[in-house]
Image (cartoon, grey):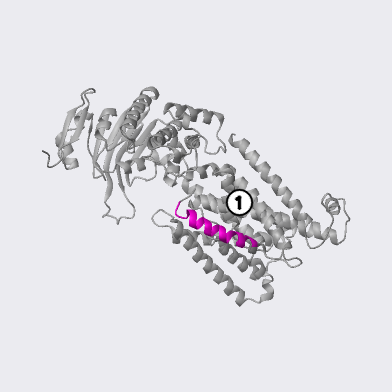
């Protein structure tokens, strides 16, 4: 099968799966609402008022959109960081990039940002700045004479992550708790309903980050040969790395700003997709985007039904899945270098 | 005629060295490769052969002097532009690599359209022709870690040909090959040179192969050129003994009449 045909087949299949999971997620919840009513509401024929309308259109649907977007963004960010560092264990939360972005968000929130579109942009900018600072710090700590050893990179990520988590704790202790609202819940990943304007900003930011990474997917394949090998074949490796880093940091920042620092999605999904579709980034990255949506949407649906009527944070589910997966990868292939 | 590649008083020192104290990896190196010429670059370890390749592929920038490719300063050319003119065949590519032979060869087409997402049918055709030339078309679907050293070498050579370069730079092309593959490799290079009119810069430890294939040889030592000329001119016993620091015997190949070099082993009977 040629490249474009493979891409179409993989994306078609995963999009179908995402649709099925989304419909399933729309149907389940603590409020019992029949499928007929849901169909009417989504197609715009339902009642104009009432609890059912609020639950479906105001809560479940935006939440599904946010989960799919966030999962896709984290998976693509993970695939991007993995290609960039040629390290199979690189991932936004493990690299400390999520913690950096979270610190940016906390800083933005103590200035009391509201829920509008401008505030959403400001929040994203702070998260992006935090992600870039943390990512750069990890790179500077871990790079030794032109190389990024697998384990050093992970340790640098852990250290930077711990530093920013501590900084967040300091800020939370100093500031009046009321102004930070549900920050603890958010720090574990909270897919609470996002207002339409903010959801738009979220979507646009994710689209930009996705384009930054996917647009250089072919060059990322060459980067697997090593930087010098890629350069000999005509790749401007420095520019490529800056662009991929910006894209992955933007994706991480957006997710952290709107949903919270959810861990391990960027580790689990790209690996699963690599087993499924291979290592060609031109297929892998779109597959990770859709697969990440499927994974996080499933995890979130589980999170809000498993202890109903209470709710778990979705980050709890992804961490329970991710930690054993990480250990498995560490034991089986940490010594090896990407891909 | 404009040379394919010209080194003009090139010096290189690693930038970390303190000013004035830097040990030059390359000193005052000047040479040129004419279109369609085979230039053999020989010399002992640490002579600077690999540095010359890295300078030529723009992995390193000269500290002094300038490098020209087809009359244009290398520093003014973009990476893709360089890769369309100069193809480097490294000693080996990373193993345990998930791509197939054909995917690797297609990577040679990147420089011709860096903005293209998928390779065009023309790219695929050129890659297949290159694989036919080096005799690896049957291995197209195999992943690289399943190939032998000799097969991998020919796949990488096919990738270099898919770049459609004017100059082929070969880094120790027979280093990992047994005698049969060495012979095949030499035959293949001869054929490519004859049929495609490619200029070749052959970097090798193997003096006999270099003498066999090259129009001219450039002998380097400690980052500087010692002598340049025909194999007969360069491969003199006195010169080689001075540069390599061991006794050698230069003879003539019984069939090709090219010079051959053999070491006079110490404590011989």
User: Which quadrant holds residue A192?
Assistant: bottom right
Label count reads 1
Q: Quadrant of the N terminus of chain A?
A: top right
Main SS class of the magenta portion in the image: helix
In the rendered view, would you say A233 is above or below A259?
Answer: above
Residue B161 position in % (x across, y down)? 43, 31
In the rendered view, would you say A292 is above or below B115?
Answer: below
> Residue shown at 64%/62% (left/top)?
A317
Q: Bounds of the magenta span?
A: A317-336
Is residue B49 on the magenta stretch? no
Whether residue A132 is visible to the viewer of this picture, yes or no, is yes
Give A283 or B182, whichever is nearer the viewer: B182
In the rendered view, would you say A293 is above or below B186?
Answer: below
| Mark 1 lies on residue | A209
- Label 1: few (<14), some (14–19) or many (≥20) C-alpha neighbours in 10 Å: many
Label 1 marks a residue whose chain is: A
User: Which quadrant holds residue A268?
Assistant: bottom right
Is residue A329 on the magenta stretch? yes
Residue B115 position in % (x across, y down)? 55, 39
Name, please, the residue furthest toward the left: B269
Q: Secondary structure at mark 1?
A: helix
> Residue shown at 81%/62% (left/top)?
A31
> Residue shown at 47%/43% (left/top)?
B97
Residue B25 position in % (x across, y down)? 28, 47
Residue B96 position in % (x across, y down)? 45, 45
| Direction from residue B2 to residue A161 in the image, left or right | right
User: Which quadrant holds residue A278?
Assistant: top right
> Residue shown at 48%/60% (left/top)?
A154
């Amino acid at each position: 099968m040629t490249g474009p045909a493979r891409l179409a087949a993989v994306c078609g299949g995963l999009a179908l799966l995402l649709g099925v999971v989304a419909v399933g997620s729309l149907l389940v919840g603590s409020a019992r609402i029949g499928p007929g009513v849901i169909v009417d509401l989504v197609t715009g024929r339902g009642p104009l008022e009432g609890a059912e309308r609020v639950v479906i259109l105001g809560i479940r649907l935006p939440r599904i959109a946010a989960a799919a977007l966030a999962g896709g963004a984290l998976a693509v960010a993970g695939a991007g960081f993995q290609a960039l560092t040629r390290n199979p264990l690189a991932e936004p939360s493990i690299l400390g990039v999520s913690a950096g972005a979270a610190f940016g968000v906390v800083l933005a929130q103590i200035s009391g940002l509201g829920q509008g579109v401008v505030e959403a942009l400001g929040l994203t900018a702070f998260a992006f700045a935090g992600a870039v600072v943390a990512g750069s710090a990890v790179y500077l700590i871990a790079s030794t004479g032109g190389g990024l050893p697998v384990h050093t990179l992970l340790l640098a990520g852990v250290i930077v992550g711990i530093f920013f988590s501590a900084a967040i704790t300091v800020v939370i202790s100093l500031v009046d708790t009321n102004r930070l609202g549900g920050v603890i819940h958010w720090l574990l990943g909270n897919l609470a309903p996002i207002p339409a304007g903010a959801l738009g900003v979220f979507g646009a930011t994710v689209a930009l980050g996705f384009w930054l990474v996917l647009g250089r997917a072919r060059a990322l394949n060459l980067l697997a040969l090593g930087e010098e090998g890629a350069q000999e074949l005509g790749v401007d490796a420095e520019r490529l790395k800056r662009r991929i880093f910006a894209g992955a940091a933007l994706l991480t920042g957006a997710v952290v700003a709107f949903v919270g620092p959810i861990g391990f999605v960027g580790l689990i999904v790209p690996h699963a997709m690599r087993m499924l579709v291979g290592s060609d980034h031109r297929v892998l990255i779109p597959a990770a985007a859709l697969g990440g949506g499927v994974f996080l949407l499933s995890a979130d649906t589980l999170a809000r039904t498993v202890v109903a009527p209470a709710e778990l944070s979705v980050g709890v589910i992804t961490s329970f899945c991710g930690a054993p997966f990480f250990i498995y990868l560490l034991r089986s292939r940490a010594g090896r270098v990407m891909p | 005629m404009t040379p394919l590649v010209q080194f003009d008083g090139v010096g290189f020192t690693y930038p970390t060295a303190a000013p004035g104290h830097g040990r030059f990896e390359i000193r005052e190196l000047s040479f040129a490769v004419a279109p369609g010429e085979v230039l053999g670059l020989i010399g002992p370890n640490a002579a600077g052969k690999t540095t010359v390749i890295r300078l030529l592929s723009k992995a390193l920038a000269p500290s002094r002097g300038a490098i020209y490719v087809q009359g244009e300063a290398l520093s003014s050319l973009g990476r893709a532009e360089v890769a369309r003119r100069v193809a480097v065949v490294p000693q080996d590519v990373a193993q345990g690599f998930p791509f197939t032979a054909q995917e690797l060869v297609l990577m040679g087409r990147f420089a011709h359209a860096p903005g293209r997402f998928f390779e065009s049918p023309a790219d695929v055709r050129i890659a297949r022709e290159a694989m036919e030339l080096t005799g690896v078309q049957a291995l197209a679907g195999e992943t690289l870690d399943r190939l032998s050293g000799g097969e991998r070498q020919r796949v990488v050579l096919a990738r270099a040909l898919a770049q459609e370069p004017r100059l082929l730079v070969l880094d120790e092309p027979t280093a990992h090959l047994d005698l049969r593959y060495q012979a095949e490799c030499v035959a293949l290079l001869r054929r490519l040179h004859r049929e495609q009119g490619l200029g070749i810069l052959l970097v090798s430890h193997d003096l006999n192969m270099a003498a066999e294939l090259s129009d001219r040889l450039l002998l380097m030592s400690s980052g500087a050129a010692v002598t340049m000329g025909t194999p007969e001119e360069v491969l003199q016993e006195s010169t080689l003994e001075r540069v390599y620091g061991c006794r050698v015997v230069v003879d003539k190949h019984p069939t090709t009449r090219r010079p051959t070099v053999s070491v006079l082993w110490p404590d011989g009977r």
